[in-house]
Image: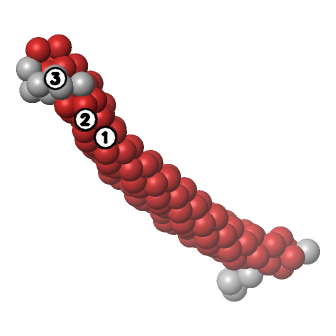
Amino acid sequence: MEAIAVGGQVLGGFAAIQQGRAQQDMYNAQAKQAEMQARNQVLQNRAEVLNHKRQGIEVLKKISQNLASINARAAAGSIDPFSGSVQNLAVYNLGKGVTDFYTSRENQMIMQAQSSVIEAGGQMQAAQYRMAGKLAKQQGYINAIASFSGAASSAKQFGMFGG
């Protein structure tokens, strides 16, 4: 009966090692998942950056078209397109367009900065998971040593090491 108790403690030690390794594998998988999620968000942000760039280009096209239309209509009506209310209209149009364009550029920069933060956060979270896995594995070995020590102590009490 004593041999069964000691054997159970030894098996418990090996089980503790396996449990620690399994926990480490689980944490490593979570680390990979955190990295993949961050990478996915970074890619989504890049798509948004491209969208903001496209919007900026569209704004510049509209400015050019509007200025050309203002000049053409003024010239068609025998009005100097570079003075008076026509010039004021052109300057106003240009001002609004430039504001829209720079807003689009600022949005691009914000999204790019946000991507850096997301990527760093994903790496940090992955590192935390890996550290937790390493600690879980170490704890498994510590539990195994405690179990083996208990088995040795029990074996000694039962007189299994001789007299």
Q: Amino acid at mark 3?
A: Ile
At 86% across and 76% down in the image, what residue appears?
Answer: 4
What quarter of the picture does the N terminus occupy? Answer: bottom right
The residue lying furthest to the right in this view is: 1
Q: Amino acid at mark 2?
A: Ala
Q: Which residue is mark 1?
A: 65
| Residue 79 tag number | 3
In the rendered structure, the answer to whether residue 71 lies left or right of residue 30 reads left
In the rendered structure, the answer to whether residue 38 lies left or right of residue 86 reads right
In space, the residues marked 1 and 2 are separated at their CA atoms by 10 Å
Mark 2 closeness class: few <14, some 14–19, many ≥20 residues within 10 Å: some
Q: Position of residue 163 (x, y in %)?
A: 68, 83
Residue 11 lies in quadrant = bottom right
Mark 1 closeness class: few <14, some 14–19, many ≥20 residues within 10 Å: few
Q: Is residue 105 visible?
A: no
| Residue 72 tag number | 2
Number of numbered tags placed on the structure image: 3
